[in-house]
Image: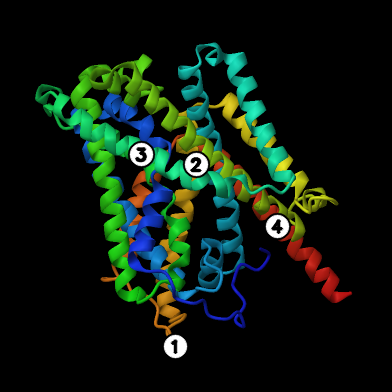
Amino acid sequence: MASPAPPTHEPALRRVIGGRGLAAAIFNITVGAAIFVLPAHMAASLGAAAPLAYLVCAVATALVALCIAEAGSRVPQSGGPYAYVGTALGPYAGFLCGVLLWLGITLAMGAVATVFADAVGGLLQGLGGPLPRAGLLIAVYGGLAVVNIRGAALGSHVSSIATVAKIVPLIAFVALGLSHVRAENLALGSFPPLARLGESGLLLMFAFFGMESALQVSGEVRDAARAVPRAIALAVTGVGVLYIAVQLVAQGILGSALAAPETAKAPLGAAAVQFAGQTGSTLILVAMIVSTFGFMTATMLSTPRTLFALAVDGYLPRSLARVHRTHHTPHVAIAVQGVIVCAIAITGTYVKLAIMADVAILLVYLACCLGVWRLRRLDVGGGSADKPFVMPAGRVLPWVAAALIVALLARATAHAWLLTGGVVAAASVAFLMNDVRKRRRTES
């Protein structure tokens, strides 16, 4: 990770992924825990105008996805934002992208863990208090850390089950609840102020994150020039339609009650009670638990490797680069990651953590938009046998996407900016110190 730009001798990746497969990957990664809780927050902020925020976020996501798709196809060797941002804007920018992605994912892990704890507390009343809740989070992350240190790939076994468990209940919720929607609950009153729409959009963007992970394989898509934009259109449209449908059904059933504080932790469960009784609410809670646990498992498997890589390259203490003698896993990095996430989840709230994660990831998105413009000007990948995907109106769309991201970032809290700025400052110092050490070793 010290030199984010991919090596030029790395062989070209095989293009074996079809457009439908890519669309499914984007859809499955994007739809996560957020849609189980955000309808209540959107209703409290925007009322019946909540679907407008979903449309804004869907457009912003689609534009950023096009930028990431072209950048990924121009730098297909590594597939990560840190790599093609590093290629376009230099190693320092690529390094910061890697750090910000780690920060965003870590904060997202904490946010999702709060949803998991709330769902378990709703299902098992004895675990709803602060102390039992903290004990639950410590036990779960402690268990995940032990499992990952021992080398078990539990995340890969859970992921397919979690995908079905989070999508099927949402579709069933919409299908079964549609006939119970009351039109008067969806009557649009006054148009919300743009400032409030921007604040809601910033929070809602958390639900649309994840597509950058799926689009990292753009260099392996067959006929990428046509398949990638089609996959993006299909997946983003599908996610947007599902999210809006869930919002409309929940709001159409509960009306103003959707925004009540007691509904905020499990709004879909509260709506499901109205047409499926307590059984429907219980099934929604179970789906939330399985979905969030699947995310927690997968991220605990992968995210500690970033700490490990940074330590190996000299940016973090060498102790984080230790490998377990028996299990050959980065056990110190895994343990530290578990402690960090657990502390964040116990002390933070979903909304605050989601907005802080938004700032970090949106900054990565902004770098990707600027990076793809630079990659196009340099014609990176243009001379290869497999022509890169070229987005339509490529001279304009990156700047439109960047403007939307800046508008969303402008609504972020000072706390979120202070945290992100502090991490960027620390990362900058680590980068400079590592660069100085390398120069000294070279000179000696």
Amino acid marked by disc 1: Ala
Amino acid marked by disc 2: Ala
Residue 50 visible from this viewpoint: no
Along the line of sight, the residue nearer the viewer: 311 or 228: 228
The C terminus, quarter of image: bottom right
- Mark 1 vs mark 2, CA separation in Å: 38 Å
Evaluate if marks 4 and 3 touch, with contact meaning CB atoms under 8 Å apart.
no
Q: Mark 1 — residue?
A: 385
> Which is more N-terminal, label 3 or label 1?
3
- The label nearer to you, 1 versus 2, is 1
* Whole-percent x, y for residue 377 in the image: 41, 78
The N terminus, quarter of image: bottom right
Q: Is residue 226 above or below residue 426?
A: below
Q: Mark 3 — residue?
A: 204
Amino acid marked by disc 4: Ala
At 50% from the left edge and 73% from the top edge, which residue is drawn?
Answer: 76
Residue 337 visible from this viewpoint: yes
Which label number is shown at residue 309? 4
- Mark 1 vs mark 3, CA separation in Å: 40 Å
Q: Secondary structure at mark 2?
A: helix
- Mark 2 vs mark 4, CA separation in Å: 21 Å
Which label number is shown at residue 357? 2
Q: Residues within 10 Å of mark 4 (few under 14, many from 20)?
A: some
Q: Residue 31 occupies which quadrant of the picture? A: top left
> Which is more N-terminal, label 2 or label 1?
2
Q: Secondary structure at mark 4?
A: helix
At 27% from the left edge and 59% from the top edge, which residue is drawn?
Answer: 233
Amino acid marked by disc 3: Leu
